[in-house]
Amino acid sequence: MSRRALLQYLELLKQSGIQHLYHESAQMLTPVGKKALLEDLAQEYSDCTNCPLAAGRINLVYGEGNAACTAMLIGEGPGDSENKIGKPFVGAAGQLLDKMLAAIKIAREDVYITNIVKCRPPENRNPSTQERLACMPYLVEQIQIIQPKILLIMGLVAAQSLLGNTHTLGWHRQSRHEFMGIPAFVTYHPAALLRNSNWKRPAWEDLQAFQKEYEKLL
Ligand code: SF4
């Protein structure tokens, strides 16, 4: 998906009137109000059939965390454990994510964590372009409500989906980005770090760069 295609899609979305658009009104919401709204939306979308991933869904994994957070973390999609439990990053990758966050002095409760697609792709395959586009309005809506000040994008699929290109993870990691006007850092997905421990050192460098910017925003 090109950046232009994504922008056109988001513009169409705005014009369609079929999605909630919270950019203005979200500024008026208290943290409690944001949390309640996110919970209502998670319930509303729990039977979504907008893409083929609905077929394998046990639970929609909408997102979890601090609705008034400074940092939002975005991964690719739910895995088996997440599908069963309905929460993001609860398996081995989730445990590693908790350790990664602790290493930069961030508790899971401090951030909001979600994914590009909210339902599990079968056999953990990459979500298709059609699936990513179908689910993107939910992520855009979450960002509009939460209004994070910084994003940490985890993994190549999430980076390419949000930044609208086909560059490598290495390219994404070495550049500064924005999504919806919000500064965005890119690093490895924790599941990738479980598969290849050689990536832990560069991931640590990414996290330190992210931490530096995050702490300026507190
Ligand atoms: S992945 Fe997203 S668009 Fe597809 S069925 Fe699930 S909630 Fe709906």
Image (cartoon, helix red, strand yellow):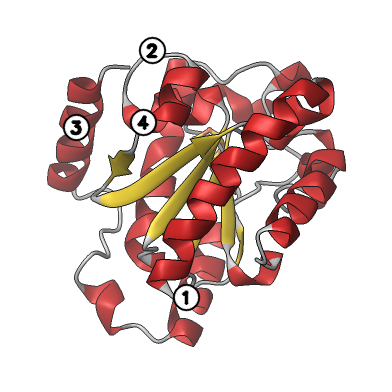
Q: Amino acid at mark 2?
A: Thr
The reply, left or right, for residue 177 in relation to residue 30 is left
Q: Nearer the viewer, mark 2 or mark 4?
A: 4
Q: Is the Cβ of the residue at disc 1 closer than 8 Å to that at disc 2? A: no
Label disc, if present, on residue 9 of the rendered structure: none
Q: Nearer the viewer, mark 1 or mark 3?
A: 1
Q: Quadrant of the N terminus?
A: top left
Q: Quadrant of the C terminus?
A: bottom left
- Residue at the spot of label 4: 175
- Residue at the spot of label 3: 7
Q: Amino acid at mark 4?
A: Ser
Q: Is the Cβ of the residue at disc 2 closer than 8 Å to that at disc 4? A: no
The reply, left or right, for residue 198 in relation to residue 118 is right
Q: Nearer the viewer, mark 2 or mark 3?
A: 2
Label disc, if present, on residue 68 of the rendered structure: 1
Q: Residue at x 42, y 28 (%)?
A: 174
Q: Nearer the viewer, mark 3 or mark 4?
A: 4
Label 3 neighbour load within 10 Å: few <14, some 14-19, many 20+: few
Mark positioned earlier in the residue sequence (1 or 2): 1
Residue 53: image quadrant is top right
Q: Position of residue 93 (x, y in %)?
A: 79, 40
The reply, left or right, for residue 212 in relation to residue 16 is right
Label 4 neighbour load within 10 Å: few <14, some 14-19, many 20+: few
Mark positioned earlier in the residue sequence (3 or 4): 3
Q: CA distance from mark 3 to mark 4?
A: 20 Å
